[in-house]
């Protein structure tokens, strides 16, 4: 019992060391429960499908499920810098302090950065996640008796543990690329096998699990390892942005106005916590000029961090970043730094360091001294810089092979912006000089690759749009001669919609712009009102409206612009229509003369009155098919639907069970 108590006490000390003790964080991104059903899996286009937001939740609702039950495994998804790590630390603190009602039985909270799971040998789950992790602090190293007590405690009490595995995209081996053997808590296995078995509930099946990763990795995770619930991070609101700006001694209102006057994607990008902090750094140095894309922003931060005393070491930092990205390493033991001839003390603006110098073990942990980049995005940018230190053939190999690696997706975008955008390239020239490959030669290689991404004068994926957004006007003018059409599936998150609108304008005139699926939101609408000026034909197969609190003004705004998209199908997702909406719907539908082939409804909370309104909409739009989510149409709701059909003489094909993609 004494060893068990010491084990639990040391895990609490370890948690505090990982999340910053009692530190309080100011603000966090908007948290949305995301429905990933019907979004496909795997690679290519489906990787752009980010699910459908169901509802906004608070931090303490992350593990909530229906009927006050608990979701055992939850995944937090977000783009680079979206705040996944910060949010998961905040959540650990809330659970540990007893502020999460659903998890009020939790006695052990354990936070594990996936980047630190670098044991390449076979080991057990407890050894990997507890023994090895906790050796890094002199006060948390487990004795043999405490290890035995901890394993025994977990075998009985796993339901009283929350384990957070932060950053599946930073696992030593690429996650989700192969089938994993089923193992138990006591079976020696590789690190990825252990993580996969925790996620699929073979190890500690009753534990509460929280994992975080970037969106693109989610599609490679096997179905049995996917979580019971997915939440997505959708950016900071204006009030939180203002608060962070003020905390950095910046006039919050002036700063937000400057962002609003910048290109539209910059404000969207800065709702991402990391990029907002980057932008405040630049704003403090020069409020008059702000970068207008991702590569320009990170390049400016690179120059701001690289003070005169460390300029001579930038080759070291880019070489380290390149080799670490290829090895998929994000936390560097001292041995790794020595191998790559890097002194972290010379690069303290880029690298944060840690050391357990007080620990006098006979066999020191490989993490007694370690370093990591201030953020993964900075590591990816430095990796892109080092590509010019390859030969021409090496760059071609990197572009065609390495950059098809999903882990290199952001590096790819940053490389193209760094080389094919003069506004980014010119301020970086002195850092890119005297490389094995000149900027001019690298530019030629990347242009050849860009042309290879365009098939039959058509751009067909969102990643190409994101790459082109990083490129300068001269590059766009050359590409413009090769592009007539943009045809793709869902553009992705809000920023993806905005980038698509911007690229349509930059590549105009186009013949056809087509999207399979499109979310209609007020910030998106304003960027597409002039799209017919840039494309002869603009069509969206399915337009989705997701608004749980429709008002006359915002519904009128949606419907006013719906004809712009020439859609065949309208998906009303959790709009929660009521009988009071019928007059509003009738007036706006008739005013704009909207016609549809398919009307789709996904709304399990809407009552029979709402389904009566749906029947009226089907009549007004002369739709041929009404698609209802499987299990969504109960007998009572069907009666409301039939009553609406009788009242409005509505006829259509009812397709229950279809969930539009």
Image: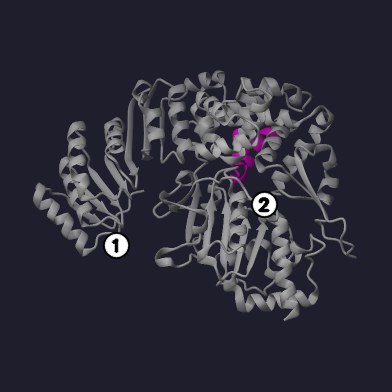
Disc 2 target residue: 23
Position of the N terminus, as image quadrant, is bottom right
Please indicate whether residue 44 sits to the left or right of residue 2 in the image. Answer: left
Q: Position of residue 39 (x, y in %)?
A: 42, 51
- Picture residue at 80% right of the left edge, 73% below the top: 143
Can residue 455 be seen in this snapshot? no
Where in the figure is residue 273, as x and y percent of width and height? Answer: 59, 40
User: What secondary structure prevails in the magenta region?
Assistant: helix
The residue nearer to you, when weighing 464 against 101, is 101
Q: Is residue 3 above or below residue 583?
A: below
Mark 2 or 1, nearer chain start = 2
Between the C-alphas of marks 2 and 1, the distance is 45 Å
**Splitting the image into 4 quarters, where does residue 200 fall?**
bottom right
Residue found at the far bottom of this picture: 1
Magenta run includes residue 527: no
Between disc 2 and disc 1, the foreground one is 2
Q: Residues within 10 Å of mark 1 (few under 14, many from 20)?
A: few
Residue 69, image x, y percentages: 45, 68
* Residue located at (35% from left, 26% from top): 529
Q: Which mark is residue 508?
A: none
* Residue 407 located within the stretch drawn in magenta: yes
Q: Please tell me which residue lies in front, 517 or 61.
A: 61
Query: What residue span does the magenta drawing correspond to?
Result: 394-413
Residue 572 higher or lower than 529, as above or below: below
Q: Secondary structure at mark 2?
A: loop
Task: Look at 68% across and 42% down and name the residue there.
Answer: 375
Q: Residue 541: tell me if it is visible.
A: yes
- Pick the front one: 457 or 626: 626
Give the labeled residue for mark 1.
631
Residue 590: percent from left, percent from top: 17, 35
- Callout 1: helix, strand or loop? loop
Check whether the beta carbons of the residues at disc 2 and disc 1 lie within 8 A of each other.
Answer: no
């Amino acid at each position: 019992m004494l060893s068990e108590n010491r084990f639990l006490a040391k895990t609490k000390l370890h948690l505090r060391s990982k999340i910053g003790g009692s530190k309080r964080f100011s603000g966090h991104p908007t948290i949305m429960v995301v429905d990933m059903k019907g979004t496909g899996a795997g690679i290519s286009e489906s990787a752009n499908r980010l699910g459908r937001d169901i509802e906004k939740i608070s931090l303490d609702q992350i593990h909530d499920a229906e009927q006050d039950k608990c979701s055992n495994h939850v995944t937090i998804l977000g783009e680079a810098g979206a705040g996944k790590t910060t949010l998961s630390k905040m959540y650990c603190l809330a659970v540990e302090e007893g502020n999460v009602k659903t998890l009020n039985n939790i006695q052990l909270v354990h936070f594990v950065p996936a980047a630190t799971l670098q044991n390449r040998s076979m080991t057990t789950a407890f050894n990997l996640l507890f023994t090895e992790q906790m050796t890094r602090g002199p006060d948390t190293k487990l004795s043999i008796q405490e290890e035995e007590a901890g394993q025994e405690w977990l075998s009985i009490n796993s339901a009283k543990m929350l384990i957070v595995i932060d950053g599946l995209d930073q696992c030593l081996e690429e996650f989700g690329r192969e089938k994993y053997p089923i193992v138990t808590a006591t079976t020696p296995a590789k690190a990825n096998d252990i993580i996969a078995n925790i996620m699929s509930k073979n190890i500690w099946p009753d534990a509460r699990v929280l994992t975080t990763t970037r969106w693109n990795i989610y599609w490679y995770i096997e179905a049995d390892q996917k979580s019971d619930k997915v939440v997505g991070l959708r950016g900071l609101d204006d009030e939180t942005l203002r608060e962070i700006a003020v905390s950095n001694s910046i006039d919050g209102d002036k700063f937000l106005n400057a962002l609003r006057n910048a290109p539209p994607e910059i404000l969207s990008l800065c709702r991402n916590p990391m990029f907002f902090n980057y932008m405040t750094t630049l704003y403090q140095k020069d409020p008059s000029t702000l970068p207008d894309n991702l590569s320009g922003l990170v390049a400016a931060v690179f120059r701001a961090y690289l003070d005169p005393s460390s300029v001579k070491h930038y080759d070291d930092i880019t070489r380290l970043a390149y080799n670490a990205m290829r090895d998929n390493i994000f936390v560097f033991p001292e041995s790794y730094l020595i191998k790559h001839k890097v002194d972290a003390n010379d690069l303290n603006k880029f690298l944060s360091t840690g050391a357990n110098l007080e620990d006098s073990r006979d066999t020191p942990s490989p993490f007694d001294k370690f370093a990591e980049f201030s953020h993964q995005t900075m590591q990816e940018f430095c990796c892109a810089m080092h590509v010019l230190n390859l030969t021409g053939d090496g760059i071609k190999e990197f572009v065609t092979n390495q950059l098809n690696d999903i882990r290199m997706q952001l590096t790819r975008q940053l490389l193209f912006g760094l080389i094919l955008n003069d506004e980014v390239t010119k301020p970086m020239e002195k850092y890119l000089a005297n490389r094995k490959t000149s900027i001019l030669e690298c530019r030629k290689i990347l242009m050849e690759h860009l042309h290879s991404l365009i098939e039959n004068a058509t751009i067909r994926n969102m990643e190409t749009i994101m790459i082109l957004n990083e490129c300068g006007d001269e590059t766009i003018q050359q590409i413009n001669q090769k592009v007539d059409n943009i045809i793709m599936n869902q553009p992705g998150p809000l920023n993806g919609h905005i980038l698509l609108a911007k690229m349509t304008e930059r590549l105009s005139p186009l013949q056809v712009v087509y999207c399979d699926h499109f979310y209609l939101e007020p910030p998106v609408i304003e960027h597409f009102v002039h799209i017919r000026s840039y494309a002869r034909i603009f069509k969206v197969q399915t337009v989705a409206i997701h608004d749980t609190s429709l008002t006359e003004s915002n519904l009128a705004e949606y419907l006013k612009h719906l004809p712009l998209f020439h859609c065949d199908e309208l998906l009303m997702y959790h709009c929660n229509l009521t009988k009071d909406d019928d007059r509003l719907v009738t007036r706006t539908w008739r005013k704009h003369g909207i016609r549809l082939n398919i009307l789709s409804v996904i709304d399990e909370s809407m009552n029979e009155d709402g389904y009566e309104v749906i029947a009226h909409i089907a009549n007004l739009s002369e739709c041929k098919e009404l698609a209802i989510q499987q299990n969504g149409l109960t007998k009572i709701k069907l009666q409301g639907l039939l009553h609406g059909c009788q009242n409005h003489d509505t006829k259509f094909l009812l397709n229950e069970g279809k969930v539009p993609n």
